[in-house]
Image (cartoon, helix red, strand yellow):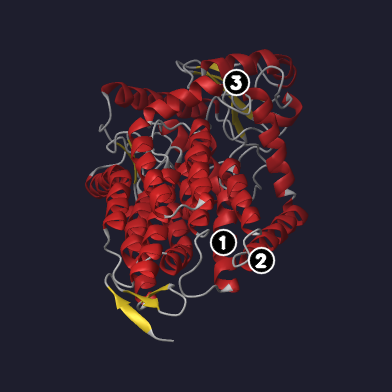
């Protein structure tokens, strides 16, 4: 069929009015290169920089150590976080042999795994200008070691699972756009399966939202074949994991206990209103894009899609430890901008540089620019400090290549230094007692098994937060969490003092019956099994 050449690297089919990228392979290759570059910049220095939430880093390293030691998440240890949260640092540890290089390497590996899917989804559904814009946006969110919505200089791998969830859900939302060059059941289906599985087994809220998107696409005639393929493949993989490791059912049980202990919705309506107010500027810009869609497209389905992006994103963000940065707003704006551009070309028969499209694209840039600048700053800062700074000399010798950067507030720096001091104190106490693992720590995180390199205990919590992962009515009995322990450590200076107090009240009888009289240091009390 005849085609009309358009500006921006695209052409329009005169028969169907569909936009076909010129050299889509080149666009896809460029997108893949952007993602790979993010992975290299993150992982190449081989060190981890932390300016805040050092305790979260210890949770992830502990999870990776457990998997390398042969444990299965949600079966041998309990956590409401998805198995990939521990599997990624485990992969990084196996690749590098270093705890301090594990997180950057693990996330870098994920970027490489997702690169083909990101390249395919964006290049097949968006014109080059939009595809490359969103590629940079999503790749930086994945690669930048900083919590969304916080100062980009506050370097940390804490809550990295939220950034993975936002990106994978975003890709599924972008796939609601019909592909410009014709649908490929296998390319679309395999890409959707990969991102759905990553979302589902990283954090349940993002995974469930992604599955809902795929289910709704079954109602769209041109999309249902690959969506059905993706849903069926995701279900088959989940069934296989259940038969092999009983993984999904264990994951669900841990999620249920967490929901019972903390409540399914944190903060309720008041928190939602607060979150909306924190993101009022973004919602204002997004409302202008909705107005453009109503004026230009007059498509109720697109308006409904944008409402889901706005409302669903707010609900998800309300579950995250995150002030701002609702990624689905930018994704909804990008999908709307692409739809406006397509209609403009069908009606006008010339380049997609009309005023409405240009306005929509400008509003999209307003939404993505703060995150792009912030994430680029964080990634650059991590590269600089990881390449030029010396790691902290932990007494726990296996905690190598971890840099405690003072790029956050003085309070954060003091807190990290204090926590590191308690870990050193605990390591010395373990040396005095000549105790061997498995070690259970009745605190927010257990840095000692991974720091000593001992065999981890089975049956305990990966992360313990009172009122979040357990409470005095919903908890794992001592006969489960302490059955494998040879050493139990109770903090005097705790990351979560209510958790330590609750554990002692719940487990005191078991400790007194099965463990010797405690030995103490400045920051720790240690119980040794009789």
Determine which quarter of the picture holds residue 105. Answer: bottom left
- In the visual, does 176 lie left or right of 340? right
Quarter of the image that includes the N terminus: bottom left
- In the visual, does 453 lie left or right of 410? right
Determine which of the numbered discs, if any, sits on residue 229 in the image.
2
Tell me the element at label 1.
helix
- Residue at the disc numbered 3: 467
Foreground residue among 8 and 198: 8
Q: Is residue 396 above or below residue 118?
A: above
- At a point 30% along the width and 72% down the height, the residue shown is 350
- Residue at the disc numbered 1: 192
Tell me the element at label 3.
loop
> Where's residue 298, x and y in %?
46, 52
**Sequence-earlier tag: 2 or 3:** 2
- Residues at marks 2 and 3 touching, judged by CB atoms closer than 8 Å: no
- Mark 2 neighbour density, 10 Å: few (under 14) some (14–19) many (20 or more): some
Inspect this view and state whether residue 83 appears.
Answer: no
Q: Residue furthest bottom?
A: 1
Determine which quarter of the picture holds residue 44. Answer: bottom left
Q: Give the CA distance from mark 2 to mark 1.
A: 9 Å
Tell me the element at label 2.
helix
- At a point 65% along the width and 58% down the height, the residue shown is 219
Q: Give the CA distance from mark 1 to mark 3.
A: 35 Å
Q: Is residue 306 above or below residue 479?
A: below
- At a point 35% along the width and 42% down the height, the residue shown is 288
Inspect this view and state whether residue 182 appears.
Answer: yes
- Mark 1 neighbour density, 10 Å: few (under 14) some (14–19) many (20 or more): many
């Amino acid at each position: 069929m005849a085609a009309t050449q358009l500006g921006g690297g695209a052409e329009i089919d005169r028969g169907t009015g569909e936009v076909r990228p010129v050299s889509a392979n080149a666009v896809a290759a460029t997108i893949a290169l952007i993602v790979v570059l993010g992975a290299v910049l993150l992982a190449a220095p081989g060190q981890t920089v932390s300016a805040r939430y050092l305790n979260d880093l210890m949770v992830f390293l502990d999870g990776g150590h457990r998997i390398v030691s042969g444990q299965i998440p949600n079966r041998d240890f309990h956590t409401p976080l998805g198995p990939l949260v521990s599997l990624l640092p485990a992969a990084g540890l196996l690749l590098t042999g270093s705890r301090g290089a594990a997180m950057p390497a693990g996330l870098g590996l994920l970027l490489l795994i997702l690169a083909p899917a990101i390249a395919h989804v964006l290049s097949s559904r968006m014109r080059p200008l939009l595809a490359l814009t969103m590629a940079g946006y999503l790749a930086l969110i994945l690669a930048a070691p900083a919590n969304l919505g916080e100062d980009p200089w506050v370097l940390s791998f804490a809550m990295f699972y939220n950034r993975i969830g936002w990106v994978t859900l975003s890709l599924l939302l972008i796939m609601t756009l019909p592909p410009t060059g014709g649908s490929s059941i296998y390319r679309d289906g395999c890409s959707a399966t990969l991102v759905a599985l990553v979302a589902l087994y990283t954090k349940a809220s993002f995974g469930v939202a992604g599955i809902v998107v795929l289910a709704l696409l079954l109602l769209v005639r041109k999309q249902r074949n690959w969506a059905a393929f993706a849903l069926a493949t995701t279900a088959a993989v989940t069934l296989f994991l259940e038969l092999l490791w009983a993984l999904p059912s264990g994951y669900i049980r841990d999620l249920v206990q967490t929901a019972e202990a903390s409540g399914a919705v944190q903060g309720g309506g008041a928190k939602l209103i607060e979150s909306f107010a924190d993101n009022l500027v973004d919602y204002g810009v997004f409302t202008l894009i909705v107005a453009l869609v109503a004026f230009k497209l007059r498509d109720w389905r697109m308006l409904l899609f944008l409402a889901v992006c706005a409302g669903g994103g707010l609900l998800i963000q309300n579950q995250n430890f995150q002030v701002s940065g609702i990624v689905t707003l930018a994704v909804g704006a990008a999908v709307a901008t692409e739809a406006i551009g397509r209609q403009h070309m069908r009606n006008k028969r010339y380049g997609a540089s009309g005023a409405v499209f240009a306005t929509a694209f400008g509003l999209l840039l307003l939404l993505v620019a703060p995150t792009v600048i912030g994430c680029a700053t964080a990634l650059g800062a991590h590269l600089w400090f990881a390449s030029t700074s010396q790691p902290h000399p932990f007494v726990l010798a296996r905690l190598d290549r971890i840099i405690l950067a003072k790029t956050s507030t003085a309070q954060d720096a003091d807190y990290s230094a204090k926590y590191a001091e308690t870990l050193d104190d605990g390591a010395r106490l373990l040396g005095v007692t000549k105790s061997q693992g498995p070690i259970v720590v009745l605190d927010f995180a257990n840095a000692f098994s991974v720091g000593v390199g001992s065999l981890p205990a089975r049956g305990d919590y990966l992360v313990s937060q009172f009122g979040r992962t357990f409470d005095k009515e919903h908890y794992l009995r001592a006969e489960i969490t302490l059955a494998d322990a040879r050493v139990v450590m109770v903090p005097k200076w705790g990351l979560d003092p209510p958790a330590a107090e609750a554990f002692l009240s719940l487990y005191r009888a078991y400790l007194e019956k099965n463990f010797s009289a405690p030995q103490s240091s400045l920051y720790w009390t240690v119980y040794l099994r009789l």
